[in-house]
Image (cartoon, grey):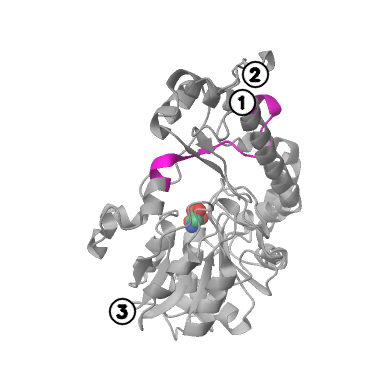
Amino acid sequence: MATVVAPSSSQVSSVPVPLLDLKAQFAPIRQEIIAAVTAVLESQQFILGPVVSECEARIAEYCGCRHGVGVSSGTDALLLALMAEQIGPGDEVITTPYTFFATAGSIARVGAKPVFVDILPDTFNIDPAQIEAKITPATKAIMPVHLYGQCADMDPILRLAEKHGLTIIEDAAQAIGAEYRGRRAGSMGKYGCFSFFPSKNLGCAGDGGMVTCSDSEAAELLQVLRVHGSKPKYYHSMIGGNFRFDAIQAAVINAKLPYLDRWSQMRQANASRYRRLFAEAGLIGTGCVQLPVEAPHRRHIYNQFVIRAARRDELVAHLRTRNIGVEIYYPVPLHLQECFAYLGHRPGEFPVSESAARETLALPIYPELTDAQAESAVEAVRSFYEINGAD
Ligand SMILES: *Cc1c(COP(=O)(O)O)cnc(C)c1O
């Protein structure tokens, strides 16, 4: 393509670029992590306990909430919040079809019906203007997702929830530390659900998660439901589950939390560098790629850097042969998943989600990504369009 600029000599070399490099994160902090884990081993107190309580208090504070309830995963955080609201068969929960499976999966698992609302094409987050039409007498909650580390447009969603008496459960699994008009992800709805899965911005050494909330009664209910609804011990006035958080995982989170803001800044710097490199490569405004949009009044923490690309599947194959780690989040929107066939949705029903699923890919954005790696990734994209064009 004529519009695509030839590479400068510094950009020609091909450096392998993993999608995520957790070893690079671990190396400089390994002593602290090992000390924190060792202290738990010495204590032999593995389930809940003081290290978990400390983690809950610190995450709650970081997220601008009064309470944190540590749980076994981000998925279980969503499930527990739904259970605390006694959402079940006959109830509807409004959410987006363009998210990780757990969002709608948890709604279905409590027996409620996931009701989908399409996304906005720029942020990939739920379109608030389409929500009200989906509210019925059965609607109990709205579950917005702060996808890729950027908050959904929460003010209109909060207004709708207030008007219709609905609970907001934020799926903030990808958005710890993200902000919307100065408010932290997880602090705007009644519940904020976080994941410490290793690939999230704050990951533990296995599975873990947290529900944040500022309502003390709800927090207490979450704590009881987390241990089979047991209160006092072995007396069950309700049915909960085992959603407990491990002390070893909490210790890892406690050790990593002081670094989170720096890592988020490094991710933001990587995003800025990509913007510069894509512009320098002449790839902007050519119909080849569209870079992520930062909506106003947001702090985007870039869990993912997701671009729209012409000829996406060919580009992905091209990048993979050049050792550039890329991923598609997500190739099939949830309304078209086989397990949700009973909902009766058809292709074309949520066109913005469907086009996002067809056209987007994530490039490596992890904090330790080097200049050479970013250049290598952009150069690989440039070379694809130089050979193939945009259409
Ligand atoms: C990761 C993720 C979850 C689930 O978290 P797990 O800890 O893997 O159970 C839920 N929702 C979204 C949007 C996620 O990205």
Q: Nearer the viewer's eye, disc 3 or disc 1?
A: 1
| Labels 2 & 1 near each other (Cβ < 8 A) | yes
Q: Which amino acid is tagged 3?
A: Gly
Query: Which element type, helix, strand or loop, lies under badge 2?
Result: helix
Dot 3: few (<14), some (14–19), or many (≥20) neighbours within 10 Å?
Answer: few
Residue 216 located left or right of residue 337? right
Instruction: Please provide percent x and percent y for residue 384.
Output: 48, 22
User: Could you tell me the amino acid type at mark 2?
Assistant: Gln
Given residues 314 and 61, the one toward you in this image is 314
Instruction: Looking at the picture, tell me which residue is in the foreground, 112 or 198.
Output: 112
Q: Where on the picture, by quarter, is residue 4?
A: top right
* Pair 2/3: label in front: 2
User: Which residue is tagged 1?
Assistant: 281
Q: Which residue is mark 2?
A: 11
Please name the residue that numbered disc 3 is placed on.
90
Residue 246 horizontal/vertical position (percent): 58, 59
View extreme (top): residue: 9
Instruction: Kindly state the secondary structure of the residue where label 1 is placed.
Output: loop
Helix, strand or loop at label 3? It is: loop
Q: Which residues are magenta?
A: 356-374
